[in-house]
């Protein structure tokens, strides 16, 4: 009995974290009406994941609205009686990544933000222009656009392009980050989106850009491993940021836990 209660509590916590990530996506202005998805594996299972439903704006999503889906993209059911349907486009990307079973991809966040899409359209992709770009530069992969992601045949190329990286720029499309948990995935997508935003701001000024020397780029990317690595005492795995963000949600957009 105690084991069942523990599993139930853990599954509910995953729903709450997913709903929180949706509402934070709204607060940061990264939404695309009803499009794009955030997902997390059902705790203790490698064959199912939770995902936000099609039909709700991101600021409306609550824990009871989250859908449970199998790796074939079939809705298993929602015991909380939530609203909304499943967007098949989300199952191709998220289903493919969750199907790997890797603990590095417990949570997946995919966005169509203005800044992320704009950088995804640039031939050079994310450039080593700022401190913000250096902290993620070596952890970003690229996937070429093949059309709206509705074909399961694209799954393998997405996985192949992602490789052992934790963030992916889908060219002419958007951004994606994965993590061992929602705090880690969210902190990664935040850093990626922020780097894209600063790049566009610098490029839009209409003046020559200040390049960084190769040795500084190398040092900056190595420092990122210390600052954001597993054994960091500064910002480990997004935990501190996530706790602060949940406090902000509780102040500004409560109700996600319901």
Image (cartoon, rainbow, N blue to C red):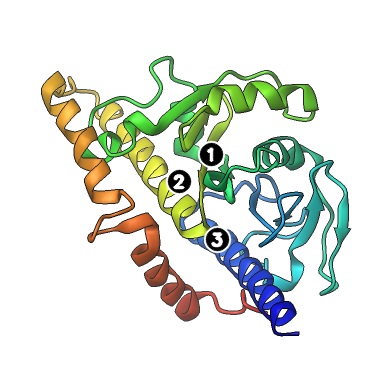
SS assignment at label 2: helix
- Residue 64, x across and y down, in percent: 74, 73
Q: Which residue is mark 3?
A: 21
Choose the circle earlier in sequence order: 2 or 1: 1
Return the residue found at the far bottom.
1
Please tell me which of labels 1 and 3 falls first in the chain. 3
Which quadrant of the structure image shows residue 174? top right
Task: Check whether the beta carbons of the residues at disc 2 and disc 1 lie within 8 A of each other.
Answer: yes
Whether residue 226 is situated above or below residue 89 in the rendered picture: below
Which residue is at 52% across, 45% downward? 104
Return the x and y of residue 14 as percentages of the image width and height.
62, 66
Measure the C-alpha gap from mark 1 to mark 3. 14 Å
Residue 171 visible to the viewer: no
- Which residue is depicted at the point 18% across and 23% down? 209
Q: Badge 1: few (under 14), some or many (20 or more) residues near its Cα, within 10 Å?
A: many
Q: Is residue 164 above or below residue 105?
A: above
The disc at residue 176 is: 1
Q: Which mark is residue 151?
A: none
Tell me the quarter of the picture where residue 52 sits: bottom right
Gap between marks 2 and 1 measured at Cα: 7 Å
- Mark 2 is surrounded, within 10 Å at the Cα level, by few (under 14), some (14 to 19) or many (20 or more) other residues, namely many
Please give the residue where the numbered disc 2 appears in the rendered image.
Answer: 189
CA gap, disc 3 and disc 2: 11 Å
Q: Residue at x 57, y 39 (%)?
A: 112
Question: SS class of the residue under badge 3?
Answer: helix
Quadrant of the drawing holding the C terminus = bottom right
Front-most of residues 144 and 60? 144
């Amino acid at each position: 009995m105690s084991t069942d209660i523990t599993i139930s509590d853990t599954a509910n916590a995953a729903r709450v974290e997913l709903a929180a990530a949706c509402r934070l996506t709204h607060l940061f202005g990264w939404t695309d009406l009803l499009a794009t998805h955030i997902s997390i594996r059902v705790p203790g299972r490698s064959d199912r994941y939770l995902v936000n439903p099609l039909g709700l704006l991101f600021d409306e999503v609550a824990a009871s609205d989250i859908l449970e889906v199998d790796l074939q993209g079939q809705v298993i059911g929602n015991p909380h009686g939530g609203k909304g349907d499943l967007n098949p486009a989300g199952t191709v990307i998220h289903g493919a990544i969750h199907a790997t079973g890797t603990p590095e991809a417990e949570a997946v966040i995919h966005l169509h933000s203005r800044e992320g899409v704009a950088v995804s359209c640039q031939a050079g992709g994310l450039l080593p222009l700022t401190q913000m770009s250096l902290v993620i530069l070596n952890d970003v992969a690229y996937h070429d656009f093949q059309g709206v992601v509705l074909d399961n045949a694209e799954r393998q190329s997405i996985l192949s392009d992602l490789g052992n990286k934790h963030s992916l720029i889908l060219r002419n499309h958007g951004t994606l980050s994965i993590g061992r948990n929602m705090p880690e995935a969210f902190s990664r997508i935040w850093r990626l989106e922020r780097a894209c935003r600063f790049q566009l701001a610098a490029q839009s000024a209409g003046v020559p850009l200040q390049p960084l020397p190769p040795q500084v780029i190398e040092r900056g990317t190595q420092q990122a491993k210390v600052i954001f690595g597993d054994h960091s005492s500064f910002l480990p795995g997004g935990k501190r940021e996530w706790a602060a963000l949940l406090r902000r949600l509780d102040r500004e957009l409560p109700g996600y836990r319901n």
